[in-house]
Amino acid sequence: MSVFVQCPPKFVAFRCHLLLALTSVLICTSCVSGRSRGSQDFLDLLLEIVQDTSDLHSDGTLRSVCATACDCLRELEACCPGLLSQRLELLAGRRQLESSRLHQPFAALHTLALRNAVYQLTQEKGAGAEHLKALLGGITSVAWEADQDSGLMNNKDSAILASLILGPMGVVPTLQTGPDCKELRSVLSSLLEESYLLTPLCQAALLHRLTEVVAMVPGIPPAIFRAQLLRLLGTSEACLLHSTLLMKCAFTDSLFSAEDEAFMLKRLVVLSQHPRLSTHEKLFYLDCILHFPENRPISSGDETLPVLLTPRLASALAPTVFNDSATLLSRFNLLCLVHLEEGEEAEEGQGLEYLHDHLTALLHIVENGGSREIVVTFFRAAFLFLFYFNHVERYSTSLTEQLCKLYLHHTNLAPHLINLADQTQDRLPESDWAVGLLTAVQRVITSITQLNPKDLKWHLKMLVRVAEEGEIPQTSTLSFLSRVITPSFSSLCESGDWRQGNGLLAVCRRLLLHPSLDSLLIPLADILQHLARCYRDTDIQDHARLYYTLLTTLSREKLAGVMKQGATNGERQVKKRSLSSLMSEGEGLTSLLTIHQTERAIFRLTEAQSEPRQESKEGDFDENKVEKCPDEANAALEAYRAQFNDPSFASELTLKYQLAHIDSHDSRFDQLFSIRLHFSLTDDHYEKLQDISVPCLFREKPSPTVKLRLKPRRPYPTTLHASAIVTTQDGLSWHTAVPDVHVAFEQTFMLLPSPPSWGEGGRLSVFEGLWEDICSENGESAISLFCCQLKEAALNALVETHFLPYLVSDPSNKEEFKLLLFLPPQCHILLKISSKEDAVHFSIATDNWLLLPHIGSYLLTITASEEDPPS
């Protein structure tokens, strides 16, 4: 606030940004709703700015600040409804007085405040026409005293207001004022008469708010909008048409005649296919047709077409194969709704027949190698067709036959067919079409006489899905599997393909759960026994042998329980040990092969004390070495510049951490082996990290050190998510979360990469050269100043504690400390620390200005514990 007051008026952009920043801070910290003194002062400032009319007849330089103040007031009112309820007369007068471009923000602000004020009155018991009149003509200032009611709505009321939807009028709160509402009527008429001056978006928002006001005040007839209807019904702006539809939803036949309704519907049909409009606009108009608010609706379904949308009118929206995917599906859905009642009585070449022919045309495109988008579009259209017309047998049967032929030529469409069957079953549980499709596909697959090895995996996927249906006989599936493992039909067993073998076992696993397992027992056992003996993959043999043992040993009920238990996710690791000893051994094997999940973290990574890279060598130091030996100093600087231009120059940062147990004691994790640490990034400041292996971790022994090698893209602080897989002493594998690893900004500091031959004088020459380069360049370089109050002893202690390794000046010179920090991959921070009369000055120079906030925050942190606070 003080910066804004002291800022000269000519800095218009800066003053605007200050207002926006203040608004954001006050709203985000809930200071406005909390009635703080600072928010009251800021509100007074904003109102003072918008009331200043001295700029009306000047060059207009202050209008931007006034417009920004209007926007800030509107944001405050939107977040805290009722804030400006006592300022309606002021806002109305200022809006009417303004004839420049500021008229629009004033109109938007006035409309929002009016709507919120009326809503606030509807929530007060006994409020009526007199209260409304006083509100519109009142000049009382907003008082936010601690012992008075501020008039602001609480969070619950604000949420209700934000979700006020114009639907049936019974759900909209009303204010009973009687016919005496001439003040409100005057305000509404004034706003509506001036609305044509606003941009379309602002007009739409204004009409929406005023519609809500009229809906809440029954004393104002909806006919007040009649003068605007002629302009709105013929508009080409989507936002204005949307506001008109909301108005129609609110007032129905009290404002819109039957002729208006028919005209609007025909206009929507025309706009939804207009060639000059974008796809998104046409889709919006199609959606408006689907949810068209009728004057007298017959039903209240989510997608109930208006009665006036006849098949003749909707025929203009018939989909074609040249439409894009979204438009095609939207039109197809609309036409399905239009012809839903025709059923088998559809005339030749019209209605339902046309939709089926269109679906067939899409199928032919897919069959001839259509793109992935066309494939997805076809299956979505097929689902829509089935959703509405699955009861029409001749079309549903025809679609089944066509899909089977399609699958036979394009087996890679198996996932789409499975998904279509799943979705149809979920959405149409009373229909048996999905079972019929799966039965037909099973018949197609099992009747194949010559098998293509590339198609086998898709056939097996389909048969797995077929086996899930208990009412489909599986005899033909077993016959097909028997042929597949026969060398004369397929070379699958000899090839030992692990993926194909797993696909075959997946079918067998599903068959173990089939209701007709008793009749499938012998052929299924023969198949499993053959796989256990002849399949050239040990893993497939082991699983086949296990399934064979389960099939021939357990009863049907126990087998079903075991298979269903094994099919669940990994959340339930503890299994009931109530079966035979064979099952106990199987459970032990399963437990060993399963990665268990710990309930909480069992260890953490803590930062280890480490010295900075490239330690300084001890020896005599001569600060005047640069002046005495200019050639040597310049040589060091030039050598460093040449080395610095190498892209691989010092790009890696090594951090050391201690891996230690967390205090919570669990004896199972006292001794851990084969620890594999995995790290994931939370931003893009660093390259992806490799996993780290730690041999062991024992609670009673010293913690091992973990070296974390980071490759920074930008040397910023970051947080690493971590997890680990460990093995306990009993041989079980566990996955555990590891507390996040926080990399602080100061952990990216490194010593200047330089050869020992340079000595301290060489590093000082590099410092002076880099300082001169940064001060003379623009681009990414920047200089800054940080000040704080520190005594001499505290300053010396601070330098010795935090910056001694990076000191390039004479340590005995306490008047000025020169520090050179290198931050990989290629950034520098240079500091000159000196004591002045008023404060300690940290002069900062860096070749990356984006580091300034981080170094400023770091300096604030390390100086915060001193006696005097930093500035």
Image (cartoon, rainbow, N blue to C red):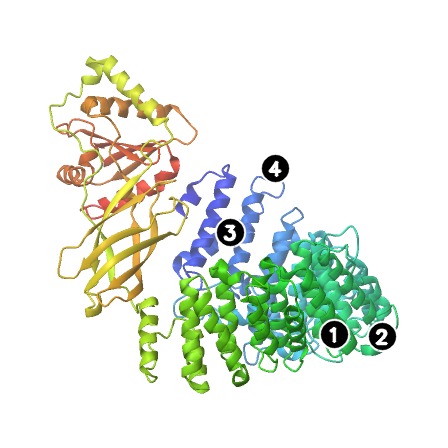
Marks 1 and 2 close (CB-CB < 8 Å): no
Name the residue type under label 1.
Answer: Ser
Circle 3 or circle 2, nearest the eye:
2
Circle 4 or circle 2, nearest the eye:
2
Marks 3 and 4 close (CB-CB < 8 Å): no
Quadrant location, the C terminus: top left
Pointer 4 or 1: first along the chain: 4
Circle 3 or circle 1, nearest the eye:
1
**Residue at 37% across, 26% down:** 645
Residue corresponding to mark 2: 346
Pointer 1 or 2: first along the chain: 2
Residue corresponding to mark 1: 396
Residue 287: percent from the left, percent from the top? Answer: 71, 65
Circle 4 or circle 1, nearest the eye:
1
Name the residue type under label 3.
Answer: Glu
**Left or right of 561, for residue 832:** left
Classify 10 Å Cα crowding around label 3: few (below 14), some (14-19), many (20 and above): few
Classify 10 Å Cα crowding around label 2: few (below 14), some (14-19), many (20 and above): some
Residue corresponding to mark 4: 59
For marks 4 and 1, give the CA distance: 73 Å
For marks 3 and 4, give the CA distance: 20 Å
**Residue at 67% across, 80% down:** 431
Pointer 3 or 2: first along the chain: 3
Q: What numbered label is drawn on residue 48?
A: 3
Name the residue type under label 4.
Answer: Asp
Pointer 3 or 1: first along the chain: 3
